Amino acid sequence: MQLVNGFKLMEYAKEKKLILPAFNTTNYELTAGIVKGYEAMGLGGYIAISSSNLKLSSPKIIANMVKAAMKDVSTPIALHLDHGKSFEDVKACIDAGFTSIMVDASHLPLEENIKEVKRTVEYCHFYGIPVEAELGAIGGKEDDHISEEDAKTNPEDVRSFVEQTQCDMLAVAIGNVHGMDLVPKLDFPLLEEIAEISSVPLVLHGGSGIPFNQVRRARENNLIKVNYGSDLRQAFIRTFGSAYEINHNEFDIMSLSKEAIINVEDRVKAIIREVNIH
Ligand code: G3H
Ligand code: ZN
C-alpha cells in the first residue's frame, strides 16, 4: 500500500472513532517493527520522525525505507514529520514524500509561533498535506532537547491560534511530558476546556508512560493522535543491552536485529490494542 495522505488518515480516524498512534522511528528496525505491528492489528496510523532524528539519515532515506517496508501492507499509514524545527526540514520532507507535517514553533513567543505555523500551513496545504502545530510547551526530553518550561496550553489562546494559523491538528501541553524521566500528570479539566474551544482535533505528545486508561479517557475530548517514541526505543535498545549483559562478546547483529524488530512490533501491537479498546 502507498503512504496515505494525512487528511485521509484523519477522516479514517473520525469514521472509525480511533485514536491514531504516531510511532517515532529512527532506523530500519524500528520502521519494520512499526509497520508489522500496524499490519498485524489491521489498523492504521502514523510513522513519525522528528527533525533531530532526521540528522542520522535524511527525509529521502526515511521515506524510501518506509515505502519499501509498506510494500505488502494493507492498512493506512501516513509518514509524519514530528516536531519540525525548520521550514527547510518541512520542505525537504514534503519533497521526499511525507504525507503529514508538524511544525513545532512552541518555543517561540505566541506571535512568532503563529507566524511560523501560518507560513508552514500555506506551503503544506498547497500540496494537500495537513499540519499539526503545538501551543504551550511540553516538558521532558524529546531527543536531544530538554524543555524545562512546562508551560501548559492557555485556553484563551486556542481559538485565535487555530483561526490565524489554519493548522489542522493541535498538540496540547496539559501535563504530558516527553521521555520516561518525568511522570505525566494529565490535567483533564484543562483538556476538556481546550477540546470545547478548539475547532481542530487534538494531539497528545509524550505517550510513553501515560497509563492507557488515561489515554482512553482523553479520547473523549476530540483527541485524534497520540505520539509514542521512548517506549519503542527502549524495546529496541533493551534487545541489544540484554544480549550484551549475557555475552560481552556478542556480535550476532542479524539475530539481534530480527529480535529487536519483534520486540518493537510487540510494543506497537500492545499500544494499538490498549488505546483503542472501546
Ligand atoms: O513527539 C514524540 C513523542 O511526543 C514522544 O514522546 O517519547 O514520551 O513517547 P515519548
Ligand atoms: Zn513530541
Image (cartoon, rainbow, N blue to C red):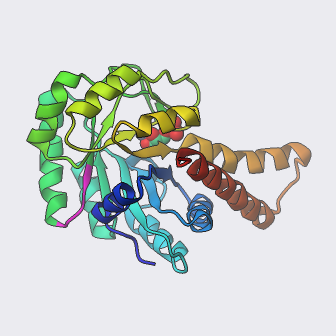
Q: Position of residue 57 (x, y in %)?
A: 47, 60
User: Where 20 falls versus 194 (above or below)?
Assistant: below
- Seen from the viewer's position, the closer of residues 250 and 271 is 271
* Residue 7 place in picture, x, y as percent: 28, 61
130 within the magenta span: yes
For the point 46% across and 44% down, the residue is: 227
> Vertically, is 248 above or below 64?
above
**Residue depicted at x 19% and y 59%:** 124
**Which residue shows up at 74% across the image and 65% down it?**
258
Q: How many marks?
A: 0
- Can residue 106 be seen at all in this image of the molecule? no
Q: Most extreme residue toward the front, as rendered?
A: 278
Secondary structure character of the magenta stretch overall: loop
Q: Quadrant of ligand 2?
A: top left
Looking at the image, is 60 positioned above or below residue 190? below
Task: Name the spot of residue 82 as percent of width and height, x first.
Answer: 38, 48
Question: Magenta segment range?
Answer: 127-131
Q: Relative to 114, is 185 on the left or the right?
A: right
Drawn side of residue 122 relative to residue 230, left or right: left
User: Can you give x and y, in whole percent of width and height, for residue 224 in the image?
Assistant: 37, 47
Picture quadrant where residue 146 is located: top left
Q: Is residue 39 visible?
A: yes
Between 75 and 180, the residue placed more toward the observer is: 75
Is residue 51 shown in magenta? no
